[in-house]
Amino acid sequence: MINRLHLSFPLILLIIIVLLTFWLDQAVQPAAITQDNEAYRHPDYIVENLSGIRMDHEKVVSRTYFAEKMFHYLNEDITHLEKIHFMSTQPGKPLMRMVADRAELLGNGEDIYLTGHVTILRGSDDEKDKITMVTSFLHLIPDENIAKTGESVTISRSNTTIDAIGFELDNRTGMVQLLSRVRAVDK
């Protein structure tokens, strides 16, 4: 029996060392990075009361924005903004302002999705032809100067109110295309 114990002791010691090595390897490995990881559910940074501008080569301000809060998420290239105000001031074009409860910017802002109570004002406050548009969702494509939605929209200008489902606004040409169920009321 002592002879058997003498032969099996190195085998038992080898098994213990292998198990201990496996356990130590698992203990020192970093946590696997997954979408469900707790670190990815929280923003990697938060900014409050921020503003920014975009200028062209002639140092003319073309766009400005203000937001109460900004949240950026590490696992996606998405930025969330709360209480957002956009303003587009391009030479020769009417002033365009957009206000929304929330915004989601994808990538470097090539696509911006406004949600909540979204209001678009085209033209200055003192212009008689100022246009006001109200919807619950708006997709902005800033580089193309396009704003569009498939949701219901109410458009007001002077004494006229128009209700429709879906629209596309091209700010370069000033054209508004209403997509369906258009109903106009003249006051």
Image (cartoon, grey):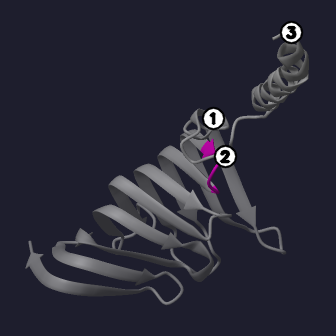
Q: Earlier in the sequence, mark 3 or mark 1?
A: 3
The location of residue 107, given as percent across then percent down, is 65, 64
Q: Is residue 88 visible?
A: yes
Kindly identify which numbered label has been placed on residue 39: 1
Q: Earlier in the sequence, mark 2 or mark 3?
A: 3
Which amino acid does the dot numbered 3 rest on? Ile
**Quadrant housing the C terminus:** bottom left
Q: Nearer the viewer, residue 33 or 112?
A: 33
- Residue range of the region highlighted in magenta in the rendering: 72-77
Looking at the image, which residue is at 39% across and 76% down? 148
How many residues crowd around disc 3 within 10 Å: few (fewer than 14), some, or many (20 or more)? few
Kindly identify which numbered label has been placed on residue 74: 2
Secondary element at image label 3: helix
Q: Which corner quadrant of the image does residue 145 belong to?
A: bottom right
The location of residue 113, given as percent across then percent down, is 46, 62
- Residue that numbered label 3 is attached to: 2
Secondary element at image label 2: loop
**Quadrant housing the N terminus:** top right
* Residue 164 versus residue 6 in the image, above or below: below
The location of residue 127, given as percent across then percent down, is 40, 69
Q: Nearer the viewer, residue 12 or 92?
A: 12
Q: Which corner quadrant of the image does residue 125 belong to?
A: bottom left
How many residues crowd around disc 1 within 10 Å: few (fewer than 14), some, or many (20 or more)? some
Asked if marks 1 and 2 touch (Cβ < 8 Å), the reply is yes
Which amino acid does the dot numbered 2 rest on? Leu
Looking at the image, which residue is at 37% across and 55% down? 115
Q: CA distance from mark 1 to mark 2?
A: 8 Å
